Image (spheres, helix red, strand yellow):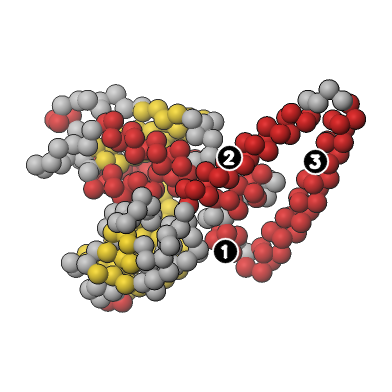
Amino acid sequence: MAPHESTEVTGARDVLADVDRAMSQLQAHPDTGVREAVNTLLEGIDAVHRAGLTHLVSALHGMSGDTLINQLIADPAIRMLLMSYDLIAVDRRLQAEEALDTVRGHLHEHGVDVEIQEVVGGVVYVRLHLARQDGREPLPLDRIRTDLESALREFLMGFQELEFRDRDLHAPPSAIVPLAALRRANRPVYLDALDADEVPEGTLRATMVKDVSVLFGRVAGEIYAIRNQCGDSPLPLDLGTLEGAEVRCSWHGCRYDIRSGRQLDGDGRVQVLPVTTEAGRIRVAIDVETGAR
């Protein structure tokens, strides 16, 4: 059975809204005694949970540094819990980047790159960079907006609105510049992974790169890289098989296109990672850095 990330995340949002609404009603109760009892109860629960979670995070950090914690907070529910107790930093920009990673592979196939410029509260400001598409119709703007908003609405808690900061989205083709010339504003940082010979045609190979498990596969001579994780579950994909460009999960039977990250038997995705080969070594981009235009 396929993992149900969207259901779990949506459910978590609904529960939080219900809890917040119930607390507000109780704290506004006309009976002073009820209000004081509610505040005492909430303070006690907060103290118990905060102490326990603080000790737990401290113990995990002592066992493995940030490695295990970073793996755990890849789960949105765990990350939300630890952020609510100020045990990890709230990075709205990073959350928005992770949300858009779920559709970047699809958009790259159509010559569209998305640069997040700013995240202010629930509003995400982006700039689109469009590459020339020889003989192909450009992706309609409303389709791009739908894809971006769907990803942000599902994976960025508190998302409210998407704003484009492009002035030339409807410019003639002559005004569109090559995509590579514009990516300097948010360029990938490539890290050494493994020998190219370790990924023969039609095989999968996983390795850790900067505490991230990355799955590599070679299709028609080209090497591709995705997160070694089936959806939002902690289960890896490297025990599965690669047939053509299709990765089949050994746990759930999910099928993904390793080139785009798109799930072939559902609406999910796996994150596609930029990859290159230099001097026989495979290098993969886990992070990005900002560079001057």
Viewer-closest of 276 and 6: 6
Q: Can residue 144 be seen in this view?
A: yes
Viewer-closest of 229 and 39: 39
> What SS does tag 3 mark?
helix
Quarter of the image where one finds residue 273:
bottom left
Task: Please indicate whether residue 250 sits to the left or right of residue 63 in the image.
Answer: left
Task: Please indicate whether residue 263 sits to the left or right of residue 10 in the image.
Answer: left
Q: Position of residue 179 (x, y in %)?
A: 24, 42
Q: Where is residue 97 in the image (x, y as percent from the top left)?
A: 44, 44
Viewer-closest of 7 and 201: 7
Type of amino acid at the residue the image marks with label 3: Leu
Q: Where is residue 285 in the image (x, y as percent from the top left)?
A: 38, 57
State the CA–CA distance, disc 3 to disc 1.
32 Å
Q: Position of residue 231 (x, y in %)?
A: 43, 57
* 62 shown above or below 87: below
Residue at image position (19%, 68%) is 221
Work out which residue is located at the far right of the displayed protein and give it. 33
Q: Which circle's residue, 3 or 1, is located before the other in the chain?
A: 3
Q: How crowded is the residue under tag 1: few (<14 C-alpha within 10 Å), some, or many (20+)?
A: some
Please name the residue that numbered disc 2 is placed on.
14
Q: Can residue 190 be seen in this view?
A: no
Mark nearest the camera among 3 and 1 is 3
Please name the residue that numbered disc 3 is placed on.
42
State the CA–CA distance, disc 2 to disc 1.
31 Å
* Quarter that holds the C terminus: top left
Please name the residue that numbered disc 1 is placed on.
67
